[in-house]
Amino acid sequence: MGNLYKSILIYGPPGSGKGTISKALNLSDSVCHVSTGAIFRGIDPSSEKGKMINSYLKKGKLLPDDFTVNIWHEFVEHKINEGLYDPKEHFLLLDGIPRTLKQTTLLEKYIKVEYIIVLEMKDLGKLIARMENRALIENRSDDLDKNVLKNRIDIYLNDTTKILKHYSNDKIFNFNAQQKKLEVIRDVLVKFAPILS
């Protein structure tokens, strides 16, 4: 494999504002944001891949690791071919991948992790309220079932804890996501604007 894609990972439980922070960072000309959730939602639901994806998402379960990494890699290669992402110039901002230790290992042949942003949110009640609100605004039915939401939060906390142990602490930056949106954006930009400008 040639050069690795220099990458920033962003973590936070569902509803902690990963999409909001990613949009803010994506305003930089040196960032290419790739959301695995958006890739999955963009696949035709009537196709074989789409049906498989929906069957997992409805239960709040993670898709198989190899499948996830392959779909992600196809998408990134497509961005390169379209001239929308240049591995030499851009950071890949990865939202939603890697989600398991196996994905972390599978991705090592493609990416070099430079920084990890962790949005911390301890108040689960607040998280669930945010996700229910998002479900209504964005018409995301997977965010309406409380049991699915709790399951997704549990998976996140369990898997992410393991993943973060895999990386050295000097790459990990924690931010308080319980603040107002603009305050979280401010905190992240104070740290990352000098790196990404």
Image (cartoon, rainbow, N blue to C red):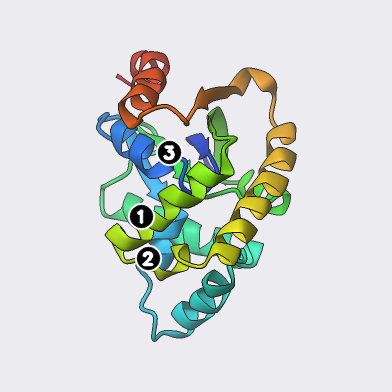
* Residue under label 3: 93
Quadrant placement of the C terminus: top left
Query: Mark 3 vs mark 2: which is more N-terminal?
Result: 3
Cβ atoms at labels 3 and 1 below 8 Å apart: no
* Label 1 CA crowd tier, 10 Å (few <14, some 14–19, many 20+): some
For residue 118, above or below residue 41 = above
Occupied quadrant, residue 185: top left
Q: Earlier in the sequence, mark 3 or mark 1?
A: 3
Q: Amino acid at mark 2?
A: Arg
> Can you give x and y, in whole percent of width and height, for residue 75 in the image?
41, 59
Residue that mark 2 sits on: 140
Question: Which quadrant holds residue 46?
Answer: bottom left
Residue 29 higher or lower than 142, as above or below:
above
In the structure shown, which secondary structural element does the residue marked by tag 2 occupy?
Answer: loop
Q: Secondary structure at mark 1?
A: helix
Eyeballing the image, is 167 above or below 50?
Answer: above
Q: Are the residues flagged by discs 2 and 1 in contact, CB closer than 8 Å?
A: yes
Which amino acid is tagged 1?
Arg
Residue 43 placement (x, y as % from top left): 38, 72
Label 2, label 1: how far apart the Cα atoms are: 7 Å
Asked which quadrant contains residue 26, the reply is: top left
Q: Which residue is mark 1?
A: 134
Where does the image place residue 125, in percent across and percent down from the top left? 54, 46
Q: Residue at x 64, y 67 (%)?
A: 64
Label 3 element class = strand
Sequence-wise, which precedes: disc 2 or disc 1?
1
Whole-percent x and y of residue 5?
A: 48, 39
Q: Which mark is residue 143?
A: none
**Label 3: few (<14), some or many (≥20) within 10 Å?**
many
Q: Amino acid at mark 3?
A: Leu
Verify CB contact (< 8 Å) between mark 3 and mark 2. no
Between 139 and 163, the residue placed more toward the observer is 139
